[in-house]
Image (tube, rainbow, N blue to C red):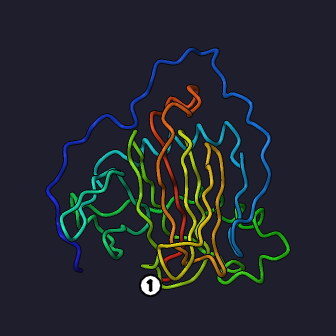
Amino acid sequence: MDGETSPRHSVEPLFPVEPLSPAESLFPPDPRERFEPAPGAVHLPDWLSPAEQRRLVHACRAWARPPAGMRTVRMPRGGVMSVRMLSLGWHWYPYGYARTVVDGDGAPVKPFPPELGALAARALADAYGPRLPEIAGAAGYRPDIGVVNHYPHGAKMGLHRDREERIDAPVVSLSLGDSCVFRLGNTETRTRPWTDLELRSGDLLVFGGPARFAYHGVLRTLPGTADPALGLVGRLNITIRQSGLA
């Protein structure tokens, strides 16, 4: 495995919680429409209910605790990602997968949670409907990877392709907390054409078929846009994937 090993990092408070009143509740969402920014890519606004969002934030806090918890990622050339990350099922590191946190504390990766698999199956059914059998890898979808990214204020993600998997099954992406400006590009280069989307808490984005290996990234987050009732500072993104690994 070619990824550089970075030193262990001390564990900071997980997704700092702001004081909440028991009477607080999630604000009603603005009405938004289903959008297909590219063939095989589907954006479903407000897909997660408020209760589901709260449960996922709670689960992420549990998954983020050591061992094999949230970590800072150092790239092979020495750069450090502004996003903090954890993996479930298989551990992602630049640029591959392992069963242990090879670029962190070395612990075995936490199991892939069945609830994420059930959410992903529902996501594909809602996104593709009767077209699902036409999307590569969707009909027999068996996800086994969950990657959770925490974007503190000021964090971003450069344009990249998810191509460490050995199968072209769709990627399911769930947003929690602060909104962000997400860029979905093309499959050939990091240049135009691309489409910029605002992803808000509870939104679902699925990309498969012709869009499966499109460049994509987060240009910026929009601090302060998370509903206070989530008790979350920053943005959480959960991506669910099928590895194709034995």
Q: Residue at x 49, y 46 (%)?
A: 236
Quadrant for the N terminus, please. Answer: bottom left
Q: Residue at x 45, y 23 (%)?
A: 18
- 89 relative position to 229: left or right: left
- 148 relative position to 182: left or right: left
Which residue is at the far right?
Answer: 130
Q: Residue at x 55, y 75 (%)?
A: 214
In percent of width and height, residue 123 lies at: 70, 61
In percent of width and height, residue 127 lies at: 75, 64
| Rendered position, 48 above or below 141 | above
In percent of width and height, residue 146 lies at: 48, 62
Which residue is at the far left?
Answer: 7
How packed mark 1 is, by other alpha carbons closer than 10 Å (few <14, some 14-19, many 20 or more), is few
- 126 relative position to 242: left or right: right
- The front one of 187 and 20 is 187
| Tag 1 residue | 246
Q: Residue at x 22, y 71 (%)?
A: 76
Quadrant for the C terminus, please. Answer: bottom left
| Rendered position, 218 above or below 213 | above
